[in-house]
Amino acid sequence: MRIVFAGTPEFAQRALQALVEARHEVVLVLTQPDRKAGRGLREVPSPVKAFAVERQLPVLQPPKLGDAAVLDDLMAVHPDVLVVAAYGLILPATVLSLSPFGALNIHASLLPRWRGAAPIHRAILAGDQETGISIMQMDAGLDTGPVLERTTIAISANDTAGSLHDKLAALGADRLVHVLEEAQRGSLTPSPQSQEGVTYAQKIQKSEAAIDWRQPAVVLDRVVRAFNPAPGAHANFSGTEIKVWSAHPTEGNGAPGLVKAVGPDGVVVSSGKSSLVLTQLQRPGGKRLPAREFLRGFPISAGSHFALPA
């Protein structure tokens, strides 16, 4: 099929790569403009652009899609379908209806659960036992279109946002290729989304990653996993913001934030009626380290306290 692909981060890059390897003709790639990043604030291309340039695919990076010139560019390549994955820009109705097969979106949740910007993080934070990929026919709403395929996977007790992202990116790429094969055969059956069970995955705020020791350890475990690799769960100890990259709940109670025990296997901190064992930490300007190594350069003693967030 002749495909216009719209996407920006690594999640989308995996889908674009699958399309190319399946020998679809990607006639144009849309991705967001380069962003300044790093200490030198150099402009860095998105993962989608980097892959497209490597494969010599034509790229457009408009700041918005409403301009007539952009629509002219899209019409000029005569696509059969528009494929969208984590693009980050709103698609106007003129773009959604541009091609014979319309616009298909790869969404990292089991719609209608977790419509919106951060479905992977929200699924972990909510303690969901499963999630998945929905391939959706896009309409004017926010992830409200009919679903063409829905595939479920389990969320393990050790999944972070990073590990779950990688699983869903691979799954989404695979199912996208399958859906396009079905579309070519004319065997797709769109299913309207249920009006029950609708939830919205609001954009992540850094303030949500602050560890509140008044919360149960099972909740804090989800916070640590949901914000790994970004922005990183963090806690304040003696005025220093420490990132917590790995932890697990354990039994035992005490005052919230109280350091109950310190050892090579971790730092045990009370969180109300339970405790959290911190097993991988990072100080400002330092590296992620197992608790044993971290404590050599940043002593924490039993009986001390982590601060409670305001």
Image (tube, rainbow, N blue to C red):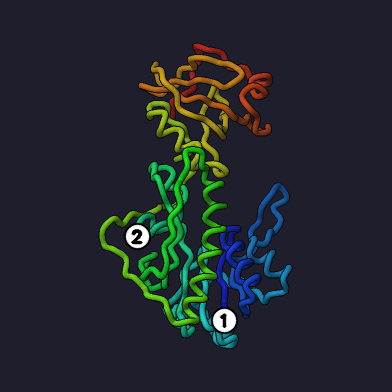
Q: In this view, does 126 lie to the left or right of 207?
A: left
Which quadrant: the N terminus? bottom right
Tell me which amino acid carries mark 1. Met
Q: Which of marks 1 and 2 is in front?
A: 1
Q: Residue 160 at what x, y percent from top left?
A: 52, 42
Q: Residue 194 at what x, y percent from top left?
A: 28, 63
Q: Name the residue under label 2.
A: 112
Number of dots carrying numbers: 2
- Classify residue 5 by image quadrant: bottom right
What residue sits 66% from the left and 66% below the top?
Answer: 49
Query: Quick check: marks 1 and 2 in contact, CB under 8 Å?
Result: no
Vertical arrangement, residue 305 with respect to residue 173, above or below = above
- Classify residue 15 by image quadrant: bottom right
Q: Is residue 296 left or right of residue 110?
A: right
Tell me which amino acid carries mark 2. Pro
* Crowd class of label 2 (few under 14; some 14 to 19; many from 20; radius 10 Å): many
* Residue 1: image tag: 1
Q: Residue 94 versus residue 97: which sits nearer the camera?
A: 97
